[in-house]
Image: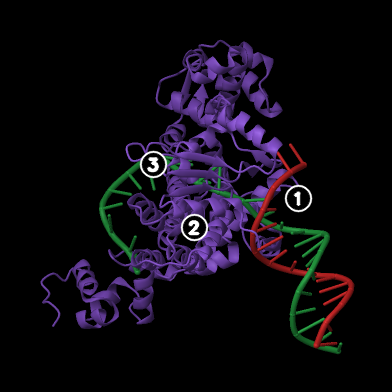
Chain colours: A purple, B green, C red
DNA sequence: CTACCACGACTATAGACAGCATGTC
DNA sequence: CTATAGTCGTGGTAG
């Protein structure tokens, strides 16, 4: 079996006693390349064994992924992507900086986030799966990766390497990526979500109180300087404002006027609206102000509020799906073989989000949201990372970042429901938030209120029939210390108000 | 008849920031 | 539209 060029170059770098970064286009490739290189290496070092051990114990229950990483680390090689837990990423970055690790194969994260210089920087993949198949990487991104080559102050030069399949491709790569200019930076305001969030924030903070003052600000933005067509921008800003009003986040003085209410029916801005004086006052509603403070996409806020308003029964899956189906979540494409399981789950649940028509583009997102919600459901059913990795192919680091997002949205949901007087929904969100934080079943909620008690310890207490604050109070210190460690047991007793306790014998 | 292999069809694909107030295994 | 690795199913062949 021939050794792939990227692996060969990496091995050569090791022979030179230098370090290399290899950039690839998927997490799976990053893992494979690191493994392929590790397989070619015979020697071992105690430092590497130590790293491997640390990577393994990054999670309380190591997953297959941890084992795989450890295997690479034992040869001084690592992979790096967002599926790793923060602790593992840090471990790898530090070890690379210290020179212990010699090769990292990584997804583009590494090029942007942290400052990790290497002698060689190998960009193996110049295409990535995007809309409509494999698309070339932006020049800007590739040059960002090249920028990791060379260690200022330590070496005179660095090497940026691409891999071409043919002479023609080689010339192409040189022209676009080495000698070409990076593409122009495109203003983020061009996208709807950012635009409406920005418009609401301007109105909510009082920086703008009319279409004229909004335009005054927009005309000075990078977006305006880039697109120049102020008339078109004005239309988009007006459309965004109109939507915000429809959603109840802002109020314009003419809101009682028939012209704008008619526009709602039609679903776009009528000519009459465009004619209305630019100086008509626009004010935020209290709800709109809070949405802006939360920095939440107004569409997501509306989606969440409508979902709760529709609800007859609140279930964990229904609420979680409402959040994961919002515009604040990136919905993965569920895999074909997961569909059946998701369909069954959806069928047996009280969903709050509306089901889009089958085969519409929204439907994929809807199912993707169901996948995330299903994963969360397992998480709050106390399933561990390994089983989630097996069932959904979602890696520990990704579980974590999804949970972070869900935590934020549960907080937002709680706030929105509180403000709009949906007390039950607010309480439910708060409860789910605690369960999501700890990954625990509902029955453990009382125990989770204690400091130093997470889902593992809470479960141990529960199994020992200590299930409420009262039970904790009634249990003896010795009894608790037999289950948990003595320091935690003592702290627990303190928390139920038993101060002057004697140290454990 | 079964175990095994070669091969083609099919599937899947990077990343991560917002509030708030501190302590998980 | 462009790639590539892993999985799964099929069909053929050797034993």
Indicate the chain on which mark 3 is placed.
Answer: A
Viewer-nearest residue: A359 or A30: A30
Label 3 CA crowd tier, 10 Å (few <14, some 14–19, many 20+): few
> According to the image, label 3 marks what residue?
A115
Q: Is residue A135 left or right of residue A415?
A: right
Nearest to N terminus: mark 2 or mark 1:
1
Q: Secondary structure at mark 1?
A: loop
Residue A247 occupies which quadrant of the picture? top right
Q: Which mark is residue A358?
A: 1
Name the residue at 48% across, 38% down: A296
Residue A351 locus on image (x, y percent): 61, 55
Is residue A494 depicted above or below A93 in this figure? below
Gap in angstroms between the C-alphas marked 3 and 2: 25 Å
Report the front residue among A12 and A96: A12
Quadrant showing the C terminus of chain A? bottom left
| Cα distance between the residues tagged 2 and 1 | 28 Å
Residue placed at 49% from the left, 57% from the top? A399
Q: Secondary structure at mark 3?
A: loop
Image quadrant occupied by the N terminus of chain A:
bottom right
Res. A270 image quadrant: top right
Instruction: State left or right for residue A260 relative to residue A65.
Output: right
Quick one: label 2, few (<14), some, or many (20+) residues within 10 Å?
Answer: many
Q: Residue at x 60, y 22 (%)?
A: A236
Disc number placed over residue A238 in the picture, else none: none
N-term mark: 3 or 2? 3
Side of A494 relative to A248 (left or right):
left
Relative image position of residue A450 (x, y in whole percent):
29, 65
- Which residue is labeled 2 in the image? A399
Q: Decide: marks 3, 1 in contact (CB < 8 A)?
A: no
Describe the element under mark 2 as helix, strand or loop.
helix
Query: Which is nearer the eye, A81 or A366?
Result: A81
A489 up-or-down from A262: above or below = below
């Amino acid at each position: 079996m021939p050794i792939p060029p990227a692996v060969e170059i990496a091995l050569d770098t090791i022979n030179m006693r230098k370090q290399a970064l290899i950039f690839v286009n998927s997490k799976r490739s990053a893992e494979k390349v690191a493994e392929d290189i590790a397989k070619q290496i015979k020697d071992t070092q105690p430092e590497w064994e130590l790293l491997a051990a640390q990577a393994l114990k990054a999670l309380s229950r190591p997953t297959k992924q941890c084992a795989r990483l450890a295997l690479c680390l034992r040869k001084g090689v690592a992979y790096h992507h967002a599926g790793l837990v923060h602790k593992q990423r840090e471990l790898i970055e530090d070890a690379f900086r210290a020179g212990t690790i010699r090769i990292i194969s990584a997804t583009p994260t590494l090029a942007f986030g942290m400052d990790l210089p290497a002698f060689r920087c190998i960009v193996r993949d110049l295409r990535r799966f995007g809309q409509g198949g494999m698309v070339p990487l932006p020049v800007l991104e590739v040059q960002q990766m090249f920028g990791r080559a060379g260690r200022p102050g330590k070496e005179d030069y660095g090497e940026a390497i691409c891999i071409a399949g043919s002479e023609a491709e080689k010339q192409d790569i040189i022209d676009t990526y080495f000698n070409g200019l990076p593409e122009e930076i495109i203003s983020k305001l061009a996208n709807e979500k950012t635009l409406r969030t920005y418009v609401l924030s301007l109105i909510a903070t009082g920086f703008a109180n009319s279409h004229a003052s909004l335009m005054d600000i927009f005309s000075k933005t990078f977006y305006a300087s880039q697109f120049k067509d102020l008339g078109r921008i004005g239309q988009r800003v007006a459309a965004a404002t109109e939507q915000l009003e429809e959603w109840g986040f802002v109020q314009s003085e003419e809101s009682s006027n028939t012209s704008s209410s008619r526009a709602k029916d039609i679903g776009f801005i009528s000519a009459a609206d465009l004619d209305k004086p630019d100086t008509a006052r626009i004010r935020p509603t209290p709800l709109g102000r809070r949405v802006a403070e939360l920095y939440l996409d107004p569409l997501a806020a509306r989606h969440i509020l409508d979902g709760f308003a529709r609800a007859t029964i609140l279930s964990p899956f229904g609420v979680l799906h409402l959040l994961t189906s919002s515009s604040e979540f990136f919905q993965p494409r569920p895999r074909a073989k997961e569909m059946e399981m998701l369909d069954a789950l959806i069928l047996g649940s009280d969903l709050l989000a509306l089901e889009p028509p089958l085969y519409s583009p929204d439907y994929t997102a809807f199912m993707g949201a169901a996948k995330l919600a299903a994963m969360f459901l397992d998480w709050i059913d106390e399933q561990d990372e390994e089983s989630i990795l097996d069932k959904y192919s979602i890696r520990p680091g990704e579980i974590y970042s999804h949970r972070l997002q869900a935590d934020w949205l549960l907080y937002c949901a709680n706030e929105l429901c509180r403000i709009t007087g949906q007390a039950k929904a607010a309480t439910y969100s708060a409860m789910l938030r605690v369960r999501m934080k700890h990954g625990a079943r509902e029955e453990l909620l009382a125990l989770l209120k204690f400091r130093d008690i997470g889902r593992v310890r809470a479960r141990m207490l529960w199994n020992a029939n200590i299930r409420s604050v009262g039970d904790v109070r009634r249990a003896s210190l010795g009894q608790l210390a037999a289950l948990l460690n003595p320091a935690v047991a003592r702290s627990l007793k303190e928390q139920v108000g038993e101060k002057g306790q004697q140290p454990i014998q």
